[in-house]
Image: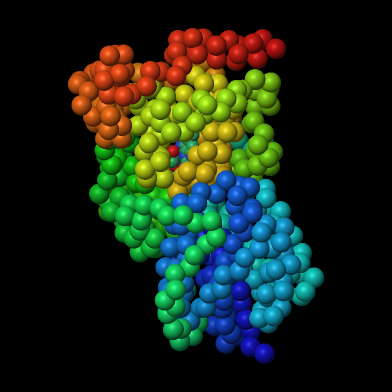
Amino acid sequence: MSDHQIVWLRNDLRSADHPALFHACNAARDSGGTVTALYIATPAQWAYHDEAAAKLALRSGLLTDLRGRLAERGVDFTLLECPRYADIPALLRSFAEQSGATAVWYNADYPLDELNRDNATDAALAAAGIAAKRCDGDMLLAEPTLNGQGLPYKVFTPWYRDWLRKVEQNGLPALPEPEPVGSALAAVAEPVALPGASSYRDDLWPASEAAAQQRLGQFAAQQRARYGELRDIPSVNGTSTLSVYLASGVLTVRQIFAAVVGDCEATGSNWRDDHWFRELGWREFYKNLMIHFPALSRGAAFKSETEALHWQRDQPLNLLWQRGQTGYPIVDAAMRQLQRTGWMHNRLRMITASFYTKLLFMDWRDGEAFFMRSLLDGDFASNNGGWQWSASTGCDASPWFRIFSPLRQSEKFDPDGAFIRKMVPELAGVDGKQIHNPPSAVRQACGYPEPIVDYSQARAAALAAFKALTNG
Ligand SMILES: Cc1cc2nc3c(=O)[nH]c(=O)nc-3n(C[C@H](O)[C@H](O)[C@H](O)COP(=O)(O)OP(=O)(O)OC[C@H]3O[C@@H](n4cnc5c(N)ncnc54)[C@H](O)[C@@H]3O)c2cc1C
């Protein structure tokens, strides 16, 4: 029997810089064997993990695109389904046995449920005499970064300095697309349709690896230089919006690193000082935290003392925030951007999460789950990190006494109200500075609500709650 390799696809829907695919194809070519790429839909697990229906629609498109790219390389594609991760070991073992596979290749994943799934699958495959080959995941370093005492960092800046040094020495290279393992296979016309998928804004994020690569090349070469200046202004396209592609693994941080270094070398600048690349550091920092502190994957606050806070769970307030009807124009504009596009600008994520946790004093875990159910770029580590940062419960979080004023944030980052006018059409005709906090008469005339919470009172209450915590 010829040698057969399986590549198990998960959050890595690409053909380039895909270690599992690359090595499986090499192994198959060496032995004259074949390769099947396998994707396993787990709808009950996805529901439990608050996976967004829109993100599943994006993934359906990405799998359709990837299936075509793989077929050109002689790699066929199979979609299987089982309810939960717990069902995967038996399903994958039986699929591997039936197809006569000698090895199953996959790229590492970091959150706890995924890790447990992979360990159980490795054991099931080993019991059947099939090799499980775990490859590098989507980080620049194969291992998380530890400090001089061999302990995890808890503050970003020293972690980043050390990480940069290690990236320079041992950063993983981006692998090319694999060479074909055989003749091209016939194209399949029927698109892949994942269970639970709805629709998404494919005009903004085409479901294609080529489109993702093109956007990366364009941003790295043309827009990156002005990133520091424009990144906080939601009304301009000052950030890359590549998070959507990164979260589904259409791109890797290694490819981004290569693009940044390449462009810096071409323009005579230093990639170590690159502001955009530093933000990508946060992504890897949060992945490191997820690996070092498994309790984060179980909904625990990083700062355990903050578990004593009495967060609210008020459904009517929750719904007004979710729908963008809080009466705070910048908050509502942000929440409506999320509804309209499945993405939200980073400055606005900080404003809306601070509003939710500090002014409504709602449990950050509920906000985190709502973001996950809504975002096309929902990423467990970054979302958890962002929410815990905002709620001041997290590692290297915003200090508890720092409470964003939605009004000040609006005046500073949307000074002429262009973003609010675009996202909150009922306020489009409001003049000048009034846009940030329209008077009651204007609100009534526009059909726009009064603020659902009084900023000064809510701020004072949040400060008192956190202060009580520090006083023990
Ligand atoms: C409450 C909250 C929730 C968040 N949830 C997510 C999430 O689910 N998924 C997600 O990818 N990011 C999340 N972020 C981080 C950040 O908002 C997004 O990564 C960023 O807005 C994506 O837009 P971009 O691709 O244009 O970013 P750019 O500014 O172009 O940055 C490039 C890349 O760097 C990474 N990055 C940038 N800023 C951060 C950051 N603060 N933390 C982690 N990574 C960062 C992202 O991968 C991003 O694509 C969250 C932040 C907050 C405050």
> Residue 146 appears at what percent x and percent y?
62, 41
In this view, the residue in front, 456 or 347, is 456
Residue sitting at x 49%, y 13%: 459
Ligand 1 positioned in quadrant: top left
The N terminus - image quarter: bottom right
The C terminus - image quarter: top right
Residue sitting at x 55%, y 36%: 368
* Number of residue marks: 0
Residue positioned most to the bottom? 1
In this view, the residue in front, 19 or 343, is 343
Q: Tell me how the rendering is colored.
A: rainbow
* In the image: residue 417, left or right of residue 72: left
Residue 300, picture quadrant: top right
Residue 109 drawn above or below residue 62:
above
Residue 337 drawn above or below residue 352:
below
> Residue 405 appears at what percent x and percent y?
41, 18
Residue 232, picture quadrant: top left
* In the image: residue 170, left or right of residue 131: left
Residue sitting at x 42%, y 55%: 199
Residue 469, picture quadrant: top right
> Residue 125 appears at what percent x and percent y?
74, 69
Residue 461 drawn above or below residue 297:
above
In this view, the residue in front, 189 or 243, is 189
Residue sitting at x 56%, y 43%: 381
Residue 256 drawn above or below residue 178:
above
* In the image: residue 160, left or right of residue 275: right
In this view, the residue in front, 56 or 405, is 56
- Asked if residue 157 can be seen in this view, the reply is no
> Residue 76 appears at what percent x and percent y?
52, 78
- Asked if residue 362 can be seen in this view, the reply is yes
